[in-house]
Amino acid sequence: MAIEVAGGVYCPLTPRDPKHRLDALIQQTQSRFVLAHQLTKTKLDGNIVLLSIDSILMSHATECVIDVTRLSKVTTVSEDVAYIIFTSGSTGTPKA
C-alpha cells in the first residue's frame, strides 16, 4: 500500500535472474528506483537509484517518526497500474 500511496508500481524481480535479464526488466518497466538486497545490488545497473533493504532495516532500529501530512498527495484512479508481473513467455522473452 505504501508503494501506491507514493505513486509507484510494484514489480518483483528475482536475484536468481542473470544481470542482462534484470537490466531488461528494469528498462521495460521504466523503473526509476529499485529496492534491493545488498547481495543483489551488485547485479543491477549503476544508472538506477538503488536503496538497500539492509540499510532500511538498520535505520529502523533508530525509531523514525514520519509526519504523514507532509507526504505528497497522489491521486489514483481505477485504471492506474498497481503491480507488474513478468512471465517467461514461450519465446523466453519476458512478457508483462
Image: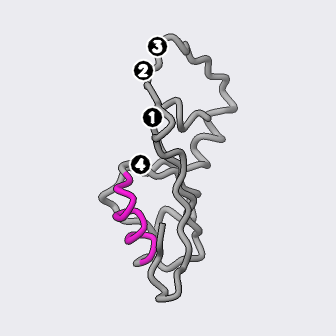
- x and y, in percent, of residue 4 in the image: 53, 36
Structural distance between the alpha carbons of marks 2 and 4? 17 Å
Amino acid beneath label 3:
Arg
All told, the count of numbered labels is 4
Residue visible at 66% across and 27% down in the picture: 62
Amino acid beneath label 1:
Gly
Residue 33's disc is 4
Task: Report the front residue among 62 and 52.
Answer: 52
Residue 70's disc is 3
Task: Report the front residue among 73 and 13.
Answer: 73
* Label 4: element kind: strand
Which residue is labeled 1 in the image? 7
- Which residue is at the far bottom? 91
In magenta stretch: residue 30 = yes
Sequence-wise, the earlier of marks 4 and 1 is: 1
In magenta stretch: residue 95 = no
Tell me, yes or no, whether the two marked residues, 2 and 1, touch with CB atoms within 8 Å.
yes
Structural distance between the alpha carbons of marks 3 and 2? 6 Å
- Up-down relation of residue 15 to residue 36 (above or below): below
Structural distance between the alpha carbons of marks 3 and 4? 21 Å
